[in-house]
Image: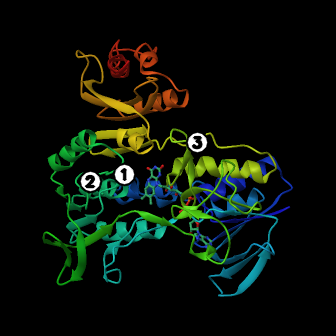
């Protein structure tokens, strides 16, 4: 059985490693167009912000170690076409420009996504960056380390934009964040939670320009970012306005595309029975919505990759589903969410509501007591928990994981109100904020 995997990062390598562990006789080749595999882009903002200085920490397994495990890795090889009728791929060796064909019994597409660029003629200008690949990180950090590069503008107030702002602030830069939405992290956090994070940015002298759209970037003595409301000079511009699945090379195939990504079932199988897909190029099953969504996160890429690996090895497992759980650190604040918001519930026709509770993270006589804000979303009729957003300092973010488990087990708010959560003064209070939220919503 010959398995070809296209893309050698989170989804692709999770599948390859799992399949090989399950069946040593499988002939697995991974084609990866960059020169590394098992690279975790999630570390990039922290590398650029010098939270650590060895870029290799972002690579969890080298090409050599992967080959030693029996997986044939071909770096600097790009798949340019798939012939699904004859089960062949067209491969371009990017080092030699040689083009050749390879045959598969089963194929996995794990090509990820590419950062979107604004429709401006600016990508050729110097010192304009996206943050996606190792190369992006190395180049951006080299510029950030230069003292003369003081002014940084970040376009995009989603996760990557905010994390990059945090990194640039740590590196002593003057940071301006420009986003087209009314609040940062639009669609992820509701206003009450986003506002706490915005206050933290402002407190740290980050200039925040919400509801502002970039029109163009020009180059004068410095880079000049022109928006519908003003002009801003910069030494470095980082563009972080989302990403799009790498599926252009599938245009000659009949593989189904939905919501701009590859349509898969809970086994990761595409509309072609011999082809699987996972990660940022594909849809992911959403447990709460009971439907498929585009959820470009490392968490689901790794898990769906593993599910595909099991299926490639002949064991038909299914993905239990994503909750879209995600978190972020903004200076001293942290925020996380899981499940759905009320707005998303209403779109799905779910009769849901939410409560907002502000309490403390731990006992008042223990040092560093801080506020913690919990928004709990639940089904009005059944009282079942559907989602949560939490913001605060120490101890806030990982409380989201309790709610993720609760959603998965269809727990009610009433049950949460009496859930036996651990307590000691440095960590919580006898009635934890989650108990209180459950109690109010029961
Ligand atoms: C800066 C940043 C921070 C992030 N932080 C977080 C976080 O904190 N938490 C979280 O859950 N997620 C985070 N993510 C998202 C996470 O990194 C992605 O969800 C994850 O990398 C997706 O893995 P993947 O394998 O699907 O795709 P990718 O990691 O994009 O890998 C796809 C690979 O396929 C290769 N490829 C593409 N086309 C071809 C082709 N035709 N032929 C051969 N090879 C090809 C590419 O070179 C690439 O290496 C972050 C992403 C970024 C960019």
The residue singled out by tag 1 in the image is: 51
Residue 133 picture location, percent across and down: 48, 66
Q: Residue at x 46, y 25 (%)?
A: 384
First-in-chain label (3 vs 1): 1
The residue under label 3 is 321
Label 1 sits on a secondary structure element that is: loop
Which residue is most to the left? 230
| Residue 365 quadrant | top left
Any part of residue 229 in sight:
yes
Dot 3: within a 10 Å radius of its alpha carbon, few (fewer than 14), some, or many (20 or more) residues?
many
| Residue mark closest to the camera, 3 vs 2 | 3
What residue does disc 2 label?
A: 170
Specify whether residue 132 is in view: no
Badge 2 or badge 1: first in the primary sequence: 1
* Cβ atoms at labels 2 and 1 below 8 Å apart: yes
- The foreground one among 39 and 388 is 388
| Residue at x 51%, y 61% (from the top left corner) | 259
């Amino acid at each position: 059985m010959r398995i070809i995997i296209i893309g050698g990062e989170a989804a692709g390598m999770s599948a390859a490693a799992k399949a090989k562990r399950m069946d040593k006789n499988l002939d697995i080749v991974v084609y990866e167009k960059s020169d590394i595999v098992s690279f975790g882009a999630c570390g990039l903002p922290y590398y650029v912000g010098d939270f650590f200085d060895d870029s290799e920490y972002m690579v969890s397994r080298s090409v050599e170690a992967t080959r030693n495990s029996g997986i044939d890795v071909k770096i600097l090889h790009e798949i340019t076409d798939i012939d699904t009728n004859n089960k062949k791929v067209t491969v371009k060796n990017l080092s030699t420009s040689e083009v050749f064909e390879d045959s598969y019994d089963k194929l996995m597409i794990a090509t990820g996504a590419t950062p979107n660029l604004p429709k401006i003629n600016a990508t050729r200008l110097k010192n304009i960056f996206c943050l996606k690949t190792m190369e992006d990180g190395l180049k951006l950090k080299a510029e950030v380390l230069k003292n003369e590069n003081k002014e940084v503008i970040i376009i995009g107030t989603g996760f990557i934009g905010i994390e990059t702002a945090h990194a640039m602030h740590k590196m002593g830069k003057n940071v301006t964040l420009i986003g087209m939405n009314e609040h940062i992290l639009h669609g992820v956090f509701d206003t009450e939670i986003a506002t706490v994070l915005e206050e933290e940015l402002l407190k740290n002298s980050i200039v925040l320009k919400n509801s502002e759209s970039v029109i163009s970037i020009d180059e004068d003595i410095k880079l000049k970012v022109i928006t519908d409301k003003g002009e801003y000079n910069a030494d470095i511009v980082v563009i972080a306005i989302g990403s799009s699945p790498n599926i252009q090379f599938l245009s000659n195939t009949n593989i189904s595309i939905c919501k701009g990504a590859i349509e898969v079932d809970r086994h990761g199988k595409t509309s072609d029975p011999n082809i699987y897909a996972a990660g940022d190029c594909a849809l992911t099953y959403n447990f709460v919505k009971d439907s498929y969504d585009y959820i470009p996160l490392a968490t689901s890429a790794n898990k769906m990759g593993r599910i595909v690996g099991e299926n490639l090895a002949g064991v038909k497992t299914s993905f239990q589903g994503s909750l879209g759980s995600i978190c972020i650190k903004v200076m001293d604040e942290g925020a996380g969410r899981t499940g759905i918001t009320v707005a998303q519930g209403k779109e799905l026709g779910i009769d849901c509501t939410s409560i907002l509770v502000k309490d403390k993270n731990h006992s008042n006589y223990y040092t560093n007591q801080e506020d913690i804000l919990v928004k709990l979303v639940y089904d009005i009729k059944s009282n079942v928990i559907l989602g949560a957003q939490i913001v605060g300092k120490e101890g806030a973010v990982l409380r989201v994981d309790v709610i993720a488990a609760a959603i998965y087990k269809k727990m009610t708010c009433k049950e949460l109100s009496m859930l036996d959560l651990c307590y000691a003064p440095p960590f919580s209070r006898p009635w934890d904020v989650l108990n209180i939220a459950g109690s109010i919503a029961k």
